[in-house]
Image: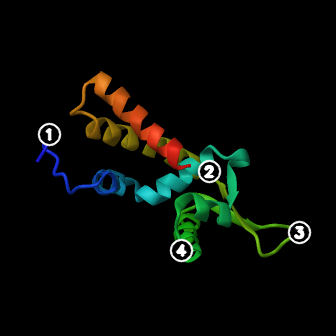
Amino acid sequence: MENGVENNYSCGILLKQIHDIQEKNINNALRDLDLTFTQVTILRTLLHSTDKQLSLKELEKMLHVAQSTTARITAKMENKGLIESFGDVSDKRIKYIHLTQYGEQYCINAKQKFEEENAHILSALTETEKLVFLSLLQKIINSLS
């Protein structure tokens, strides 16, 4: 073991463990809002998209999940009034989802939960270490894109 990290642990495994812990903690924090990590990710993605809408296909690619999974999650969100869906006028095969005002408010409320969890995860690091860590993660993401 070197620096408290076993040599047989790959970067991917460690990143996956961090993600899994963060997702579990955020899901617990979001329980009172009746939202999940994935649903908030969709809300935040829509909030920052042009006209606060995306096609299901675009969303599916961004989330890296199957079409059936995206359809199931967005159907639940539509039932809650967080989003609304509609078909493309020129191509009925294309379905869009749009963030509602109600969904936008939920997104704002959930943002605080994300920020609290993010602060918790990084709390073991100094401010300098946080900047270096986040910079290195971004560098890895950029190299993989």
State how far apart marks 4 and 3 are (Cα): 24 Å
Residue type, label 3:
Ser
Task: Tell me which label, 1 or 3, sits earlier in the chain.
Answer: 1
The kind of secondary structure element at disc 1 is: loop
Residue 7 spot, x, y in % from top left: 19, 52
State how far apart marks 1 and 4 are (Cα): 43 Å
Q: Which mark is residue 72?
A: 4
The kind of secondary structure element at disc 3 is: loop
Mark 3 lies on residue: 90
- Observer-nearest residue: 102 or 19? 19
Q: Which residue is at a point 37% across and 43% down the rendered structure image?
A: 113
Task: Tell me which label, 2 or 1, sits earlier in the chain.
Answer: 1
When the figure is inspected, residue 72 is found, relative to residue 117, above or below; the finding is below
Specify the quadrant of the image occupied by residue 92. bottom right
Q: Which mark is residue 3?
A: 1
Q: Are marks 2 and 1 in contact (CB under 8 Å)?
A: no
Task: Tell me which label, 2 or 3, sits earlier in the chain.
Answer: 2
Residue type, label 4:
Arg
Q: Which mark is residue 46?
A: 2
Q: Which residue is at a point 54% across and 48% down the rendered structure image?
A: 44
Q: With 124 as the anchor, is 110 left or right in this view?
A: right
Nearer the observer: mark 1 or 3; the answer is 1
State how far apart marks 2 and 1 are (Cα): 41 Å
Task: Tell me which label, 4 or 2, sits earlier in the chain.
Answer: 2
State how far apart marks 1 and 3 are (Cα): 59 Å
